[in-house]
Amino acid sequence: MKKTLAMLACLASAGLAHAAQDPEAVFNRSCQMCHNGQLPMAPKKGDQDAWKARLAKGNDVLVKHVTEGLNAMPPRGLCMDCTAEDYTAVIDYMSNDPASRPR
């Protein structure tokens, strides 16, 4: 009975996965070197026009690009301890207009 309850608890929480790390902290530590405008082909944080076509590809593709690397971006985007959920949160953080964020 205890094993069944434990398994049900795990299954119920599996759908609640979220980033373990703060997206802003990950960005500042691993992404900002390129995504603050220093690398012209990297979409700048908050530049919704630059992110629009990338976001249209879907989250799975974007996370795959970060994980495997793409063009000048190194594999894992220099965040070796990030999960797929962390990457999703950082992509959301970078692709949104900072002026629209609650403070």
Image: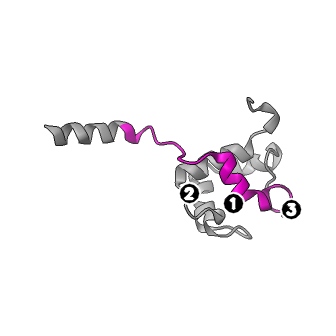
Seen in the picture, residue 13 relative to 73 is either above or below; the reply is above
Magenta residue check for 23: yes
Relative placement, left or right, of 97 versus 62 is: right
Q: Secondary structure at mark 1?
A: helix
Residue labelled with disc 1: 30
Residue visible at 81% across and 50% down? 50
Q: Amino acid at mark 1?
A: Ser
Residue visible at 25% across and 42% down? 7
Color theme of the render: one colour
Question: 10 Å neighbourhood of mark 2: few (<14), some, or many (≥20)?
Answer: some
Relative placement, left or right, of 16 versus 54 is: left
Residue labelled with disc 2: 82
Question: 10 Å neighbourhood of mark 1: few (<14), some, or many (≥20)?
Answer: some
Sequence-wise, the earlier of marks 1 and 3 is 1
Q: Amino acid at mark 3?
A: Gln
Q: Over which residues does the magenta segment extend? A: 13-42
Residue labelled with disc 3: 38
Q: Amino acid at mark 2?
A: Cys
